Image: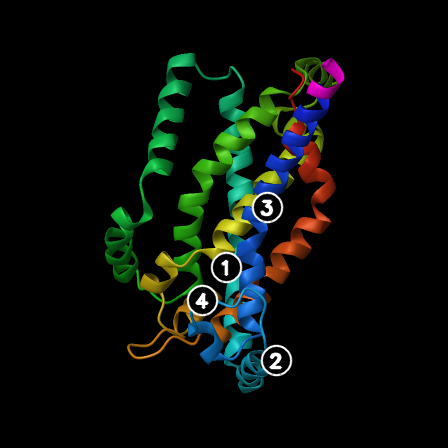
Amino acid sequence: MLLNRKNMERVLIYLICTLIIIMVLFPVYWLITTSLKYDKASYVFPPQIIPKEVTLKNYFDILILTQEGNLVKYLINSLIITISTIFFSLLFGSMAAYSLSKSHLSYSIRRILLVIILLIRIFPPITIAIPYYVLLSKLHLIDTHIGLIISYVSFSLPFAIWLMIGFFQGLPSEIEEAATIDGCSYWKRFYKIVLPLSAPGIAVTGIFCFIFSWNEFMLASILTSEKAKTLPVVIAGFISDKYIFWGKMSSLGVLMLIPIIIFSLFAQKDMVRGLTLGAIK
């Protein structure tokens, strides 16, 4: 009886995990299948779970945009803005998180600073989109890489700080104490000891910052027009007042998934270590 109960629990767990995986992967499957359909097949009812006709026309249409140079320009814009956002978020976030994770400041000051940082992250981006637009327009940074990078860093930095604080607090203090006895200064301990030991946590933070900046649409649509336009804004351009080009939108969406998958595969080892860092403690 006990064995049967354990087997039933195991089967139930597998069923729940299978349902969760299907729920997570089905949007990706639907995106890929829609990119392989003719546009008219996207409007049929009931929807075609398995396409009856498969075509690569949508990808060839995207390839034409690439040959014209427009899509390449938008891809370069997305890469520049995303990589810069990750760099500055990790740079400033790691320094701020390390300072706030140690007892160099009083507990009350650290708590106030962390609450302020958290409040900044809680605000929906739409609430401060107009102030951002006014500020950047006065600085002549509308439709520029710098303007969008500043906006993205301001949103990803609080998240990076809160995420990395836990990793820095989980490091053994004895290692830093030994380095101090050996004559290491504060900054030397930070970039020679703390950062290498926190590499898994930094990798996790970088992946989340990458996903946010790579997929962000609202700020990019408000703060850019042509010169600094990113790929999510290009995808939204396939929506007109009379027609929605589902095939082209889906095909470009599939192409946008590739850098995320590649980035995650390269950082997979550090990502798994980072997600479980400090779990036993």
Q: Please provide the residue range marked out in magenta.
A: 1-5
Question: To which residue does mark 1 refer?
Answer: 81
Asked if marks 1 and 4 touch (Cβ < 8 Å), the reply is: no
**Label 2 belongs to which residue?**
56
User: How many residues crowd around disc 4 within 10 Å: few (fewer than 14), some, or many (20 or more)?
Assistant: few
**Side of 4 relative to 144 (left or right):** right
Q: Amino acid at mark 1?
A: Ile
Q: Identify which residue, 213 or 142, lies in the foreground.
A: 213
Indicate the quadrant containing the C terminus: top left, top right, bottom left or bottom right: top right
- Residue 114's label in the rendered image is none
Instruction: Work out how far the residue at label 2 is from the one at label 1, CA to CA, in angstroms.
Output: 30 Å
Q: Is residue 87 visible?
A: no
- Three-letter amino acid code at the position of disc 4: Pro
Residue ID for mark 3 = 207
Rendering colour mode:
rainbow
Magenta span: helix, strand or loop, mainly? Answer: helix
Residue 168 lies in the magenta-colored region: no
Q: Is residue 242 left or right of residue 236?
A: left
Query: In the rendering, at what x and y percent does residue 205 appear?
Result: 57, 40
Query: Which of pointers 1 and 3 lies earlier in the amino acid sequence?
Result: 1
